[in-house]
Amino acid sequence: MTDVEIVSQVNAEIKGMYNYYSIAENATVIKNFAFILEYSMYKTFGLKYRKSVYKMQISA
């Protein structure tokens, strides 16, 4: 998978979850989910480029 495909997949998952829970009263919980997915994305890039998550966040 290319970097663009990974970022697009993460964005699609966040948007899908937000659209699903947007009518709920606790839609702010999606921010926590988005944070977890963002960390997971950095972890994926870190494994792909053999760098730490911290270095991936700095270079983003």
Image (cartoon, rainbow, N blue to C red):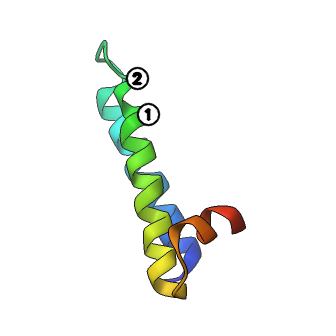
- 54 to the left or right of 31: right
- For the residue labelled by badge 2, is the local secondary structure a helix, a strand or a loop? loop
**Residue 55, image x and y in percent?**
62, 71
Residue 28 tag number: 2
Query: What percent of the width, then of the height, locates residue 8?
Result: 51, 63
Image height check: is 30 above or below 25? below
Q: Residue at x 57, y 65 (%)?
A: 54
Amino acid type of the residue that numbered disc 2 sits on in the rendered structure: Thr
Q: Quadrant of the C terminus?
A: bottom right
Rendered residue at 49%/53% (across/down): 11
Q: Secondary structure at mark 1?
A: helix
Q: Nearer the viewer, residue 60 or 21?
A: 60
How packed mark 2 is, by other alpha carbons closer than 10 Å (few <14, some 14-19, many 20 or more), is few
Nearest the camera: 18 or 55? 55
Q: In percent of the image, x 55 and y 86: which residue is there?
A: 49
Q: Nearer the viewer, residue 40 or 16?
A: 40
Give the residue at x 62% y 62%: 57
- What is the x, y in percent for residue 7? 53, 64
Amino acid identity at mark 1: Lys
Q: Residue furthest right?
A: 59
Q: What residue does disc 1 label? A: 31
Residue 60 in view of the camera: no
**Left or right of 43, for residue 17:** left
Is 50 left, or right, of 20 in this rendering?
right
Label 2 close to label 1 by CB (< 8 Å): yes
Q: Would you say residue 55 is visible in this rendering? A: yes
